[in-house]
Each structure stands twice: as structure tokens, then as C-alpha cells.
Amino acid sequence: MTQTLLSSLTTSEVGGPAARYEEARTEAEIIDAVRTADAAGEPLLIIAGGSNLVVSDDGYPGTVLKIASEGLAVETADTCGGACLTVQAGHVWDDVVDYAVRHAFSGLEALSGIPGSTGATPVQNVGAYGADVSQTIWQVRTWDRQAGAVKTFVPGELRFSYRDSLLKQTTVEGSPRYVVLSVSFQLPLGRTSAPVRYAELARALGIEQGERASALEVRREVLRLRASKGMVLDPADRDTFSTGSFFTNPVLSEADAAALPEGAPRYPAGEGLVKTSAAWLIERAGFPKGYGLAPDSVTGGRASLSTKHTLALTNRGDASAKDLLALARDVRDGVRREFGIELHNEPLLIGLEL
């Protein structure tokens, strides 16, 4: 029997074989597959777009379930304050953003170009360019593996924070307790964007931070900016064979932030907290764009930092998961030595530790 390699299902193209592989195209099929794996006591790995996973070269010893459900439905009603857009978990995320912008539903445009599926967005509280999905999510419908029942969450129950949520934190023997079935977004009607809060995007649009622009123009500019950094999947560009940003931006106490060098980025991150830039720290710790390409590097040139953006760890063509982790450890340890700050991985590591 031909085994399915996880490298064929992930954007970084690493990962060994799945012991058992299934695809589920409907909500009922998702629930049935999860219940079957749980009843058999098998480990379960949920995968959709594969853009936020780095899987061991040894593969996965249980069931790998690919969420392939698609479809979206729109309801406009007073209870939604505009449009309620309900999307199946396996639907490609950027297709959702494109649909919203073209149908004059505002609020998702700054999240253009992010790879992966819709069901993954609330788990990681996906965000970019000053926006994240927690700002527009209305409901998340899930299968609760522990209770054996469907459970629907509203935003206040999901404990959203920077690249985190209850859905990410709550696990059953290492895999999610709650399997996302669909996500509903509450979006204002109109062709004007949400306020543009990210300085780089505002400059590109020729507006001040906090001002609004055409949602279509915001989408176009975000796609252009992301492509310039290798953050839009392109089969012809090895810089895009990654999980996107590998490290999260560190959130520091005000005292720790005060010890940062002059010129280090500082952004408010809640009471007594300051966020700084992982990319800034990486470059100034001695890891420039393209670091690792040399044949005598820690990965033999098989993996490197993107030549466009230091936050992306890229597969140059024949890298292994071991190579990516060796590069990640090299960068993490260098930033710790230089600044005393510990970087943390954004993608999920399956069968691996940083």
C-alpha cells in the first residue's frame, strides 16, 4: 500500500509518512473520522492547508485527517450588524477574503494572501498588517472530542490573544480537543476597509495610520507586500516553501523592553507589556536574509532564511524537518546570546521540539 507523505501536504514540504491517511469533505465525514480514530485509541493529526505545521521526518504514527470541506453561506440580518459569512473549515482562506472584498463585506482585506484553511484561522488567531481574525469572528462551530458532541463558541469564550486561543491550548493527548467544523464572521457592509493600523501598509496606500481606504486597494497592496517578502505561495519561488513567519514577535515586560537597544521596535501589547520585532532581533543577531544558503552551513544549504524576509525558514529543495529545526535552533540560540530574549515557534511542531 502506498503511504501518504506529510511532505506532500505541507507548505514547507517536509514530513515523513502517515500511518493512516483519510480525507473528509463534509462536516459529517469529519466527525465520523475523528470518532473512529478516538474509538480505536489512535493518535490523531488534523491537517488542512498544511501551512502551519512542521512534521517529523519519521512521519506520524496514527491517523492523519485532512479537512477538505468547502463552501460558504451568507446571511444578512440585523442580528449580524451587516453580513454573517459562515465558511466550512477546509475552505481556502484567501478565497474567503477575496469573496468578502468582492461582495462588499469589510474587515478581512488586511488578511489577504495568508496560506491555509479557514478552520485554522481561529486556532492560531491568524493575523497580519494590524488585523487578526478575532476582530471579525462571530461563532466557531467545533466537534468536542471529549464530550462527543458539537460545541459552538462565541468570541468571548475563545480566549483570543496574540497567535493563540482556547482552541490551540486545549488538547487531548497532544492533539486538539476541539476540531473546527466551520467559522462564522460578522462583517460590516461596504467597500471601505477597516481602519488601517499597520504603518507599512498605510504608507503603501498613501494614508495615515487609522484611516480607511478602498477594501479592494487594501487587498491588492497587502498581496503585493506579502509577495515581496515571499509570503504568498509561488511554485516558482523557493522562498515561499515555508510556514510563513517561523517565530512570533516577543512580548516583553516594560522593564525587559527598556533593556532593548536603541532603535529596536516597540509596540504596545496590553497593560505593562511591549511587543518587539523578531525579524529585527534576528537580523541584528547576525542572521541576514538568505542565512544558511552556504554549503558549509548547519543545513548544508538545504534550508535557509528566506532571501526576502528573515522570519521565514525555507526549504531550498531537498531539506528535511531536521534541517529546518537545526536552522531554527541556530537562529534562536543566536538571538538569546545577543539579546537575552527567547524566540518561540509559531507553527506547530509535530514529533519535534525546538
Image: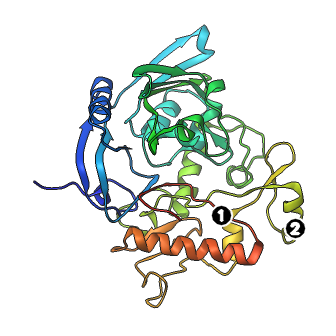
In the rendered structure, the answer to whether residue 132 lies left or right of residue 266 reads left
Any mark on residue 211, and which?
Answer: none
* Residue at x 43% of width, y 89% of height: 295
Q: Secondary structure at mark 2?
A: loop
Q: Residue furthest bottom?
A: 296
The answer to which quarter of the image holds residue 138 is: top right
Q: Which residue is mark 2?
A: 259
Q: Amino acid at mark 1?
A: Leu
Please say whether residue 307 is visible from this viewpoint: no
The type of residue carrying mark 2 is Ala
Residue drawn at x 37%, y 71% is 320
Depicted 96 relative to depicted 233: above or below:
above
Residue 269 appears at what percent x and percent y? 79, 47
Which colour scheme appears in the figure? rainbow
Label 1 sits on residue = 343
**Nearest to the observer: residue 141 or residue 208:** 141
Which residue reaches farthest front? 41
Q: Residues within 10 Å of mark 1 (few under 14, many from 20)?
A: many
User: Dividing the picture into quarters, in which one does residue 218 lie?
Assistant: top right
Give residue 326's position: percent from left, percent from top.
49, 75
State the separation of the CA atoms marked 1 and 2. 16 Å
Q: Position of residue 185 (x, y in %)?
A: 55, 26
Judging depth in this view, the residue of 136 and 170 nearest the camera is 170
Question: Is residue 110 in sight in this rendering?
Answer: yes
